[in-house]
């Protein structure tokens, strides 16, 4: 776990809830996208709170989501979801996720999301603000 935490200084601790398991008695596949979302929002809250953008009618929207399931997770467990950034462009970037199970002491799931900056007033893509771009580049794995 120490290696995971050092590799992912930005991570979110998420306890697995009993109700997240499905009939096969492991965490349902769609729940991981909620875990990714929680970690993504936590990442931004730590580095660049989105309310700065929302005031101007802008924000990142997810255009692509992927998950790879390596090991099943069951209740009770606590997961650490690590976040990293890559593929930064003028209007988009990729967020990568790794899910570490405290109970199993292993990576159980990996994933990624492409986030595109969107202007909700114009209903169109927008360029990433310079301040956000700088934060993303500072924390990029590229």
Image (cartoon, rainbow, N blue to C red):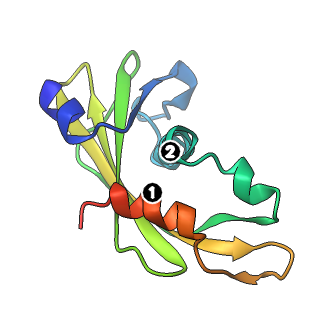
Q: Is mark 1 on a helix, strand or loop?
A: helix
Say how many tags the image has. 2
Marks 2 and 1, how far apart at CA:
7 Å
Left or right relative to 18: residue 124: right
Can residue 136 be spotted in the picture?
yes
Question: Residue at the location (57% across, 25% down)?
Answer: 19
Which of the pair 49/32 is nearer the observer?
49
Rendering coords of residue 47 (x, y %): 50, 44
At label 2, counting other C-alpha atoms closer than 10 Å, the crowd grade (few under 14, some 14-19, many 20 or more) is some
Q: Where is residue 37 in the image (x, y as percent from the top left)?
A: 54, 47
Badge 1 local density, few (<14 within 10 Å), some, or many (20+)? few
Looking at this view, is 136 or 11 the one in front? 136
| Residue of label 1 | 135
| Mark carried by residue 47 | 2
Residue 100's mark?
none
Q: Quadrant of residue 13?
A: top left
Q: Is mark 2 on a helix, strand or loop?
A: helix
Find residue 57 and report its horizontal and vertical position in percent.
82, 65
């Amino acid at each position: 776990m120490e290696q995971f935490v050092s590799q992912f200084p930005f991570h979110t601790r998420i306890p697995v809830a009993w109700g997240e398991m499905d009939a096969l008695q492991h965490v349902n596949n769609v729940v991981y996208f909620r875990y990714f979302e929680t970690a993504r929002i936590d990442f931004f809250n730590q580095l660049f709170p989105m309310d700065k953008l929302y005031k101007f009618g802008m924000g990142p929207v997810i255009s692509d989501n992927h998950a790879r399931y390596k090991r099943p997770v069951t209740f009770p467990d606590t997961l650490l979801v690590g976040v990293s950034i890559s593929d930064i462009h003028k209007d988009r970037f990729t967020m990568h996720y790794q899910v570490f199970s405290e109970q199993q002491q292993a990576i159980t799931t990996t994933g990624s999301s492409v986030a595109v900056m969107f202007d909700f007033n114009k209903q169109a893509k927008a360029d990433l603000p310079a301040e956000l771009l700088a934060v993303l580049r500072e924390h990029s794995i590229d």
